[in-house]
Image (cartoon, rainbow, N blue to C red):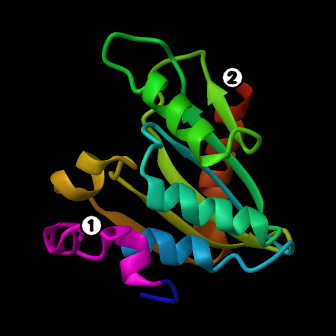
Amino acid sequence: MRGGSKQAALQGRPGAYEWLSRGLLESIVAFIERAKDDAWSLEGAFYEFQWPAVQDALKAAERRGVHLSIIYDDIESDTGSWEKNEKAIEDAGLADVCKPRQRGRLMHNKFLVLSEGGKLQALLFGSTNLTENGIFGHANCVHIIEGEKPGILIAGKAKDSRSER
């Protein structure tokens, strides 16, 4: 794990959470912590965006001056996560950097693009919803690809998602 405190990421949860995380949560938090100041940006999209440790890491990045832009699923449905997303975002104080996606089909995206000085640096993506079950209860994963080219592909997808709001 690059930077970041394992205990901070797990927020005092029991030892079983550390084992269940398998480094997943710690890797997400460490990825966010790479963005150091106002020269950096983090742009992403998430279907379920509710886990406090990730939101806390993003809020800390915002306090460092990092530009944040997160799109989250906000389509009302019987099974959707929209209400939980809205509450978690409000509770974390991230409403000003989070944009709801309320039109189109189910937005099942899970990615975060890291840029410095407008140049894409790395891409985090995978199957992990940012919830207790998504991080600790399912066999999910995230991948981190370094460099500009992978981020260019997903950055276009993020732009498309923003236009569907």
Closer to the camera, 147 or 17? 17
Magenta extent? 5-25
In the image, what residue occupies the spot 70% across and 38% down? 95
Q: Amino acid at mark 1?
A: Arg
Please state if 103 lies on the left or on the right of 1 as rendered: right
Closer to the camera, 154 or 113? 113
Q: Main secondary structure of the magenta part?
A: helix
Q: Position of residue 128 (x, y in %)?
A: 34, 52
Residue that carries the numbered disc 2 in the rendered image:
165
The reply to whether callout 1 and callout 2 are in contact (CB within 8 Å) is no
For marks 1 and 2, give the CA distance.
Answer: 35 Å
Please state if 135 lies on the left or on the right of 99 as rendered: left
Q: Earlier in the sequence, mark 1 or mark 2?
A: 1
Query: In this rendering, is residue 16 above or below 77?
Result: below
Residue that carries the numbered disc 1 in the rendered image:
13
Q: Position of residue 112 (x, y in %)?
A: 57, 58
Q: Amino acid at mark 2?
A: Arg
